[in-house]
Image (tube, rainbow, N blue to C red):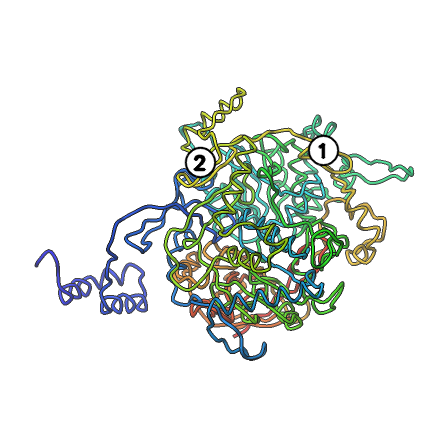
Amino acid sequence: MSPKPNRREFLGIVGGGALGVATSGVTLKGLSTLNAAIASEEVHVPRGPEAWSLSVCSLCPAGCGLRVRTIGKRAVKIQGNPLHPVNRGGLCPRGLAGLQVLYHPDRLRAPQQNVGSREAPRWKEISWEEAMETLTRHLRELRERNQAHSVVWVDGRYGHLRHRLFRKFFDAYGSPNCLHTGTGLEAARAALYLQQGATEGVAYELEHTRYLLSFSANVLEGWGSPVSNMRAFGSWRDAEAGRRTKFVQIEPRMSLTAARADEWVALRPGTEAALALGIAYVLITEGLCDTRFLAEHTFGFEDWRDASGRSHMGFRSLVLSEYRLNQVAAITQVPLETILRLAREFAGNRPALAIGGPQCPTTPGDVYGAMAVHSLNALVGSLEVPGGALVRPDLPQGSHGPHPANTEREPGGTNHARESVIRVEESLLPWPDVSRLPQVLLSRKPYPVQAMLIHGADPVFSLPNGEEFARALEAVPFVVSFASFLDDTAAHADLILPDHTDLEKWQESASPPTFAFPLQSISPPVVAPVHQTRDAAEVLLRVARAMGGEMAEALPYSTAEEFLRSQVAGIFAAQTGYSFSTSLEETWNRMSERAGWWAPTFSSAQELWEEIRLRGGWWEPTYSYGEWNRALRTRSGRFEFYSQRLAEWTVSHPEFVRAGGFEPGDDRLCLPHQLRLPEPPEGFPFLLLPVEVLPLAGGTGAEIPYLQQIAGPHVFEHWESWLEMNPETAKKLGVEDGEWIWVESPRGRGRARLRLFEGARPGVVHLPLGYGRTQGSRWACRGVNPLRLVASEPYSPAGVARALPTFVRVYV
């Protein structure tokens, strides 16, 4: 046989290996796909010079650094940037899928205008000149009519400097409505604000903790920064360093995270707060708390009296009276002995860390559960210490998080007064909740919204009240989407201005959720645009120039690169941090800073810019622990077990108090506590818990074939939704593995393939998030969206749309 077989010889080789294929687990469908690929046109390898370029992944909030191999004008391979502090050369499957996004056949290739109706859209491809004229004309007319305040910007793209640009644009335009969707850690962020007064968000130094209690946080499957978490997970098992961190995963289902943990504790769904408070009971009664930290840095641990002399229950009294071990064991269905052992191990292996409860971008979680978990960190003194819970520091010249929604300004300018369309003063938290938009749009209060611009978000698909969001969009006269694919929200737009993908534009990203150090990644485009798309940032810069006046003055940049350069100049002016470097250089820089030296490798803003381009970004690798003025910004200046912010809010919101089963003035509302567990309604016996899997984390990725193929390896399922059910439950129901079944809730129903899974709890069923789109890629429009089945609380006190416990029935 010749060294280079022809097609007939190659087919013979494949045919001769059929037995091996059959015994390897490859399906007939897979074999057919292989044969089809062999019989198709031969792939032509691109020609031209080979090069490597840096970029940033934005397929999840982590913002991992990339190295992209190009041949000629085509990108052919993606791998991790070894200098990037978040991923250090590693990548998760989502990062590796970037090329399938870039060359996806279903991307929008040019601007689209809806020439039909919202109910029956008809899309017409138009030129960018016509698209820009349409957008600029609408925005100019609203501003001239003193209605600039009625324009709403909804942004879901991860990053930081682009958020600054968008805020600057709408500040100059005259709108206070620059809103952002969540990252999936809203409940933890809310707990940090209510108990510490900080708005930046919480960070966890996972790598240096000695004991981790994870309350339903899918640490290895999309929570926070997956690759950074996996790197920390690897360091916990570093035999050469003599370290062994114990990792305990507490959740109802045996997830991939639970399977890889040292111990899995299966508890009753929704009882994470009770278990955390049961552990607190042991810490308190056995004297295992950090008494010095409690005395110097906490408020509300003991009973206390306010200025009027009224006495209030403290955290200690609540726990000792209502969360005794036998009570908690009965609520959570976790053995009393297990709770006792976990508490003793947690206190005896410091620094210890507790994270959770259950939350992800589409189901943000319960704030009281997050407060209960965070209270464990305070009890053992794991706040502001290495290996503990930290407050994320700001980048120089800016802050993380959304634009303050109570900023007052008048339409048509930035120096007048006008309230935000979402009144933050009515919310418990100081940031706006995008899930409240439907009620605002339909009620037309405090004023009608005349235009909405949506970038990097698909709220119709990803919010628990997405159907209501779709109906509310009908009340907005002008809707613009910057989607790269026709998604469920873009289908309701009047104009679609398709954005570049990551590899086609100047890309940037800041510190990911849970990451403890200020960081800014910046990278230039890797390839020229594949289609007639444009960077949304440069679209707004062009609008600002066209409108002239104060808008052109506020945004004097012709390109996104110019704006990013100006922000790097601000970082340089702060005289801190370093460009990305090797681990050895990082260690030396940290040692130097601890000794009082700062020796950067750049001496000007231009040099810093060049180093960022060469290495991928800038960061400050040293955290200042114990800066209590920054970490504890409550009214008391302490960690508040008893949240005084919650106390103020409940006084003016008695309807929330009564909805929780309490009477006004009940101190338990201001303390961490277990919410009431609902009983299944008649005819709906099974509890539905949506689950997040890494390939479809955040509810995105279903349009990418590679991610679809690896979505459910634990049940050998992909390409369609599946329903996980315990074999005992299936036996009683009379259904079998692989059957197509209906899942029905009081809100709706969907069809999925049944998969028997020993890791599912009897009486509980699970659907994966990310499926069930109605628009977009040919591969995304399949399966069931669990958020269309679950009940939701559109406006919860946590400031997020909370998915409520939902019961379903299952039938063939």
Residue occupied by mark 2: 580
Left or right of residue 743, residue 259 in this image? left
x%, y% of residue 284? 71, 33
Is residue 633 among what the camera can see?
A: yes
Picture mark count: 2
Left or right of residue 597, residue 405 in this image? right
Residue occupied by mark 1: 285
Which residue is located at x 71 percent, y 40 percent? Answer: 197
Which amino acid type corresponds to the residue marked 1 in the rendered image? Thr
Using the rendered view, name the quadrant where residue 253 is placed.
bottom right
x%, y% of residue 100? 38, 59
Residue 593, placed above or below residue 164: above
Q: CA distance from mark 1 to mark 2?
A: 47 Å
Q: Helix or strand or loop: what does disc 2 sit on?
A: loop
N-terminal-most mark, 1 or 2: 1
Nearer-the-camera pick, 781 or 502:
502
Circle 1 residues within 10 Å: few <14, some 14–19, many ≥20: few
Using the rendered view, name the quadrant where residue 602 is placed.
top left
Q: Are marks 1 and 2 in contact (CB under 8 Å)?
A: no
Q: Quadrant of the N terminus?
A: bottom left
Which residue is located at x 67 percent, y 43 percent? Answer: 199
Residue 469, placed above or below residue 279: below
Nearer-the-camera pick, 34 or 537:
537
| Residue that sits furthest to the front in the current view | 549
Which amino acid type corresponds to the residue marked 2 in the rendered image? Phe
Q: Helix or strand or loop: what does disc 1 sit on?
A: helix
